[in-house]
Amino acid sequence: MRWAAPGRVNLIGEHVDYAGGVCLPFALAERTVVEAHTRADGRFTARSTAEDGVVDVALDEIAPGSPAGWAGYAAGVLWALRAAGHAVGGLDVAVTATVPLGAGLSSSAALECAVALAVDDLYGLGLARTELAAACVRAENEIVGAATGGMDQAAVLLATAGHALLLDTRDGSTRQVPFAPADDGLAVLVIDTRVRHHLADGRYGARRASVEKAAAALGLATLREATLRDLEGLRDVERLDVDLLPRARHVVTEIARVAEVVALLDDGRLREVGPLLDASHESLRVDYEVSCPELDLACAAARAAGALGARMTGGGFGGSAIALVPLGRVDDVTRAVCDAFAAAGYGGPTVRTAEPSAGASRVG
Ligand code: GAF
């Protein structure tokens, strides 16, 4: 049997899912497909079209850092479900990956969620998708060692076609927000810079640590509770840690931008969200420092060629940008971004249109 899970892009609400914030991702059409079978010998075996070799590990040997590399995302899901007390035995998986790896499009969450659905079906667990998402997050945090929040797994498991998923990470609540750019004569372009990133490499975790430190310094559970005025209270701490104030400012202003974008979408005014996308990118570039020259160039070139707004999406340090583009300008924007990359001596980006698509499901 086979299960498929999509990649995602985040329309807005970046680096706020571990701060109790709100975000607005949607699922892509590109999917990671997992063919899975139970094994009676208590082992996890895996291979992937995107990787060499076969991974073979006993369930009891799954632990932080083991197995290393890509298979940790899949094996970690079995570990997390077993740790939560569910009766899960061995599994063999064959992965066909069409979500680009390391592109900021959540190939890792797609793999985790496809495996989670497979385990849930094959072992008859009957878990809610929110419970499966939580297991996927534990896999990533504890087995892979990436201190990510829960946005990607929620998007992959809960998204529906023609909508963005408004996720409130403070209480886990969600709402489907109608989002069909083509109906407004628009397209969302996803520009993969081909600069590869890895969220377990320390920089992502450092951002999360700053945000948690800022909240603690203000006496708050999370920065969701903070206002811009409250951040003045960080000036003293800032003498010790100069990054704290701008990091916290990004989180607080980004959460406010999400609310503005949702209000515009609810009002049928998608064409007006461009400046908020631009402001999000500036905040991520200047205050949060998770952009890179290739992402900045992609956004600038897209805007100059007629995009209504553009921003990096996902964890950053490489990966992809999105641009909101009138349908009639898609070719111009695509060409302008490719030309700008060539002129800067960067490798060619990959540009595709993103359709808000359905979440993960069994496919055969
Ligand atoms: C990555 C993480 F996995 C998410 O949890 C989120 O923090 C995102 O970066 C930034 O918004 O995709």
Image (cartoon, rainbow, N blue to C red):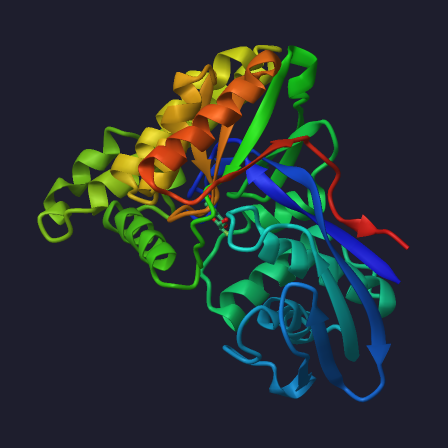
Q: Is residue 208 above or below residue 224?
A: below
Q: Is residue 226 in view from this perspective? A: no
The C terminus lies in quadrant: bottom right
Which quadrant holds residue 250? top left
Asked if residue 354 lies left or right of residue 91, the reply is left
The residue lying at 76 percent from left, 68 percent from top is 94
**Residue 138 at what x, y percent from top left?**
57, 64
Asked if residue 65 lies left or right of residue 111, the reply is left
**Residue 79 at what x, y percent from top left?**
64, 75
Q: Is residue 230 above or below residue 96?
A: above
The residue lying at 61 percent from left, 22 percent from top is 187
The N terminus lies in quadrant: bottom right
Q: How many marks?
A: 0
Q: Is residue 173 above or below residue 85?
A: above
The residue lying at 54 percent from left, 64 percent from top is 140
- Foreground pick, 219 / 106: 106
Asked if residue 105 lies left or right of residue 44, the reply is left
Q: Is residue 299 above or below residue 139?
A: above
**Residue 272 at what x, y percent from top left?**
49, 11
Q: Is residue 97 in view from this perspective? A: yes
Which quadrant holds residue 287? top left
- Foreground pick, 235 / 309: 309
**Residue 145 at what x, y percent from top left?**
47, 68
The residue lying at 68 percent from left, 84 percent from top is 56
- Foreground pick, 298 / 59: 298
